[in-house]
Image: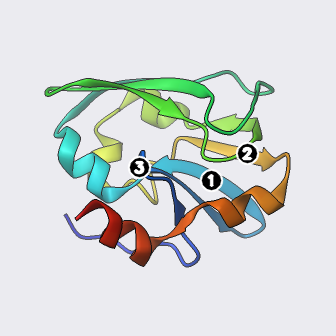
Amino acid sequence: MSFEIPEGLLCTKTHECVYQQDGTYFITITDFAVEQLGDVVFVELPEAGTEFAAEEVFGTIESVKAASELYAPVGFKVLEVNDGLVAQPELLNKDPYADGWLLKVELTDVSELDTLLEYDDYKTEVH
């Protein structure tokens, strides 16, 4: 698995992460989580317009190995769901930071990003 890590990627200990690209925030899971899950076969995501508080369950992901709930890394409102990922869950295995993003969101409190781990700290934490 080889892909580019987005600059400024911030992660939770439960493997969800946030990054910003062209002024838009994206939610996905880390490459480490994808690797641990194995082949992703199903992703259940919320509808656009739904709001979540930090640490609230916002979806489910199933792989050949396990099913896992997805937790909001920070509070957010869903702007867009990656419909391509819902139709082709394997996109998450190919690149969780490009075609495999889960949600485009509007953060409810940008200061909550300060509670997340920078990618290098996350990698140290999980290894």
Q: Residue at x 48, y 32 (%)?
A: 70
Distance from disc 3 to disc 1, alpha carbons, whole Å, reads: 14 Å
Up-down: is 121 above or below 83?
Answer: below
Residue 15 numbered tag: 3
Q: Is residue 51 left or right of residue 58?
A: right
Up-down: is 78 above or below 17?
Answer: above
Instruction: Give the labeled residue for mark 1.
Output: 26
Q: Secondary structure at mark 1?
A: strand
- Depth check, mark 3 against mark 1: the one in front is 3
First reached walking from the N terminus: tag 2 or tag 1? 1
Quadrant of residue 58 within the rendered picture: top right
* Residue 88 rendering spot, x and y as whole percentages: 35, 32
Residue 113 numbered tag: none
- Quarter of the picture containing the N terminus is bottom left
Q: Residue at x 58, y 48 (%)?
A: 27
Quadrant of residue 43 within the rendered picture: top left
**Badge 2 vs badge 1, beta-carbon distance below 8 Å:** yes
In the rendered image, the residue lying farthest to the right is 108
* Residue 116 rendering spot, x and y as whole percentages: 59, 61
First reached walking from the N terminus: tag 2 or tag 3? 3
Q: Secondary structure at mark 2?
A: strand
Q: Amino acid at mark 1?
A: Phe
* Residue 114 rendering spot, x and y as whole percentages: 70, 66
Residue 105 numbered tag: 2
